[in-house]
Image (spheres, rainbow, N blue to C red):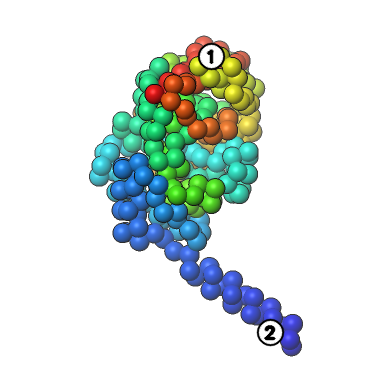
């Protein structure tokens, strides 16, 4: 009986702890967005479960939309196991990209572009067809997009204690979407045989992140993102559908990180090169 009571007590404690987790209030979401705009560290969202993270993100997105307007796409985050490990979470999350977040190749950006600024090697795809929302394989995705776009993402973890962030909290802060630098688009081949070759190239490419002097900072493989980078879009389609959303033609989708997240330094810069991906040119950013 003593053991049974102990087990029941543990269950009750766990239930009580779970009940304390809840969606951010409207006031908390507004305060988070105010901090984002001011580029000052916000209070960490804490005690959120997966549903709370999604609910909180929706409130934050509604407030961001009032300030930044048009949604231009989405970002899949935590798609790389190494990044999942950093945040102690075992599945991807997603956020929204807004008009004005995407900058041209070679842009110079303030090193302090956010409260907790970082940069990473990434890749965008552009949606061609709403059929992307039914994609089940990378091949399905490739048939529903028309461009690959080299991309250096400039996320902002924006909270007072980034190491304490987990998956639901990262969802709540819109996956840290702040800025990104876009390179020269690569067109998707029209012919099936060429598309298959591109699928293999995307999986097998080596993505190298270098500093302004050309010294290598990090590298990753295409397969580091969910086994194939286009699997990030497959996952995103399913995740958006659960919340009654869908990608549309023209949307830009950030696939996730091929490199560690690094802090920018004034006077420095970064270049990402996609070795093995035909026609992909480097993309670069400078920090001031």
Q: Are marks 1 and 2 in contact (CB under 8 Å)?
A: no
The residue that appears at 61% across and 25% down in the rendered structure is 218
**Number of residues whose C-alpha sits closer than 10 Å to that of mark 2, classed few (under 14), some (14–19) or many (20 or more):** few
| Residue 230 screen position, x and y as percent | 55, 31
**Viewer can see residue 28:** yes
Residue on which the image places disc 1:
213
Q: In the figure, residue 156 lies in which quadrant?
A: top left
Quadrant of the frame with the N terminus = bottom right
Q: Which residue ends up furthest to the bottom in the rendered image? A: 1
Above or below, 274 relative to 244: above
First-in-chain label (1 vs 2): 2
Q: How many marks?
A: 2
Q: In the figure, residue 202 lies in which quadrant?
A: top right
| Residue 26 screen position, x and y as percent | 31, 59
Above or below, 23 relative to 42: below
| Residue 13 screen position, x and y as percent | 59, 75
The residue that appears at 31% across and 42% down in the rendered structure is 37
The residue that appears at 48% across and 34% down in the rendered structure is 118
Residue on which the image places disc 2:
5
| Residue 234 screen position, x and y as percent | 53, 37
Q: Which residue ends up furthest to the top in the rendered image? A: 279
Above or below, 258 relative to 165: above
The residue that appears at 54% across and 70% down in the rendered structure is 17
- Say left or right for 17 vs 284: right
Q: In the figure, residue 111 lies in which quadrant?
A: top left
């Amino acid at each position: 009986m003593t053991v049974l009571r102990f087990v029941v007590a543990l269950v009750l404690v766990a239930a009580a702890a779970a009940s304390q987790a809840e969606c951010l209030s409207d006031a908390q979401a507004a305060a988070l967005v105010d901090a984002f705009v001011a580029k000052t560290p916000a209070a960490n969202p804490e005690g959120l479960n997966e549903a709370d993270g999604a609910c909180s993100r929706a409130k934050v997105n509604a407030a961001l939309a009032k300030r930044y307007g048009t949604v231009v796409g989405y970002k899949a985050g935590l798609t790389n196991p190494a990044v999942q490990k950093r945040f102690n979470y075992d599945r991807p999350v997603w956020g929204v990209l807004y008009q004005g977040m995407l900058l041209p190749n070679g842009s110079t950006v303030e090193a302090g572009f956010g409260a907790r600024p970082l940069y990473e090697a990434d890749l965008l795809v552009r949606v061609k067809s709403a059929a992307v929302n039914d994609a089940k394989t990378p091949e399905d995705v490739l048939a529903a997009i028309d461009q690959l776009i080299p991309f250096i993402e400039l996320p902002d973890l924006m909270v007072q204690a980034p190491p304490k962030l987990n998956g639901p909290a990262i969802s709540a802060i819109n996956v840290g979407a702040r800025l990104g630098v876009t390179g020269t688009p690569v067109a998707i081949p029209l012919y099936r045989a060429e598309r298959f070759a591109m699928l293999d190239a995307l999986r097998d490419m080596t993505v190298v992140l270098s500093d302004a002097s050309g010294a290598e900072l990090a590298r990753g493989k295409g397969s580091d993102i969910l086994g194939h980078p286009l699997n990030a879009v497959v996952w995103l389609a399913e995740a958006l559908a659960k919340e009654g959303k869908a990608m549309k033609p023209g949307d830009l989708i950030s696939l996730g990180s091929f490199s560690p997240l690094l802090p920018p330094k004034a006077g420095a810069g970064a270049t990402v090169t996609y070795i093995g991906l035909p026609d992909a040119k480097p993309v670069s950013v400078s920090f001031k």
